């Protein structure tokens, strides 16, 4: 049921007006605002199509930039890890190759050193042989220390020892070792087949071979060689 408003209360009632979007009222008359009447809240402007497009583009650009940065960081990390793995693999491969080369070089160097040492020993022995022969030719009395050593190799109570020498060496021994020969006494046997510079001692207790051939053979055996005095 509708309520009838008295005439005296109409002055306090504000006439309703249609407010357009631009905020201005239709009609020429405006109601005078009363002192205690609150001002109406301003209307909120809706975003335009351009605003929506601008907001969308900004968000899209920010998203793309963030995606690019994240993708760059992820790609950089992955590339760095892959590069490190590849570099380490190549480094390990190169290190293994160098180690193999080093081992081969060491083996080759060791073999070369052995060959050089063997060649030097052969040369030294050959030079020694030639020097001994030349010494005996120029100074035959150089055989006397070897003969004395062979004579001392017999037991003190040996009876009738025999000293076998080359005829030319026998003359030197008689001349220079007369005192030693008279102690047992010694018997000297000359053998033209005996090489110069050596001797052989024979007794009832055994034999001492001090020929140059045998002495040279023992020297070569001690050095792991097999060189003949007559070679």
Image: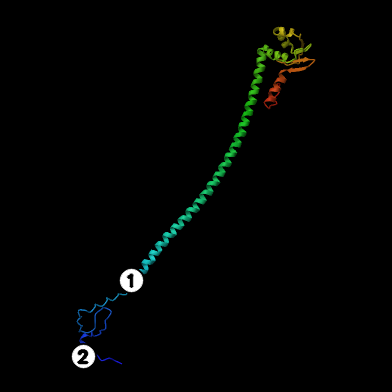
* Res. 41 mark: none
The quadrant of the rendering that contains the N terminus is bottom left
Image height of 124 relative to 146, above or below: below
The quadrant of the rendering that contains the C terminus is top right
Callout 2 secondary element = helix
Residue shown at 44% from the left, 57% from the top: 73
Q: Quadrant of residue 203?
A: top right
Q: Residues within 10 Å of mark 1 (few under 14, many from 20)?
A: few
The answer to whether the residues at label 1 and label 2 have Cβ atoms under 8 Å apart is no
Q: Is residue 186 left or right of residue 61?
A: right
Q: Report x, y in % for residue 113.
A: 61, 31
Q: Is residue 22 left or right of residue 158?
A: left
Q: Earlier in the sequence, mark 1 or mark 2?
A: 2
- Viewer-proximal residue, 158 or 176? 158
Spatial CA distance of label 1 from label 2 is: 51 Å
Q: Report x, y in % for residue 230.
A: 71, 21
- Viewer-proximal residue, 1 or 53? 1
- Viewer-proximal residue, 27 or 60? 27
Q: Which residue is mark 2?
A: 7
Q: Residues within 10 Å of mark 2 (few under 14, many from 20)?
A: few
Is residue 231 visible in the rendered image? The answer is no
Image height of 23 relative to 151, above or below: below
Residue shown at 46% from the left, 57% from the top: 75
Q: Which residue is mark 1?
A: 51
């Amino acid at each position: 049921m509708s309520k009838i408003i008295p005439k005296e209360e109409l002055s306090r009632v504000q006439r309703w007006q249609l407010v357009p979007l631009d905020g201005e009222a239709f009609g020429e008359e405006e109601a005078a605002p009363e002192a205690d009447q609150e001002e109406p809240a301003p209307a909120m402007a809706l975003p335009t199509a351009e605003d929506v497009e601008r907001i969308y583009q900004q968000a899209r650009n920010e998203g793309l930039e963030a995606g690019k940065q994240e993708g760059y960081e992820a790609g950089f990390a992955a590339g760095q890890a892959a590069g490190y793995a590849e570099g380490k693999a190549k480094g390990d491969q190169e290190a293994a190759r160098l180690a193999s080369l080093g081992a081969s070089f060491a083996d080759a160097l060791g073999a070369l050193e052995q060959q050089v040492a063997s060649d030097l020993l052969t040369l030294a022995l050959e030079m020694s042989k030639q020097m001994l022969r030349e010494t005996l030719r120029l100074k035959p009395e150089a055989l006397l220390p070897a003969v004395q050593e062979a004579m001392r190799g017999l037991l003190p109570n040996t009876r009738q020892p025999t000293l076998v020498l080359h005829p030319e060496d026998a003359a030197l021994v008689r001349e220079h070792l007369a005192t030693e020969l008279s102690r047992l006494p010694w018997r000297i046997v000359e053998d033209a087949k005996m090489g110069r510079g050596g001797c052989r001692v024979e007794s009832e207790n055994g034999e001492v071979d001090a020929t140059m051939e045998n002495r040279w053979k023992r020297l070569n055996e001690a050095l792991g060689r097999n060189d003949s005095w007559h070679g």
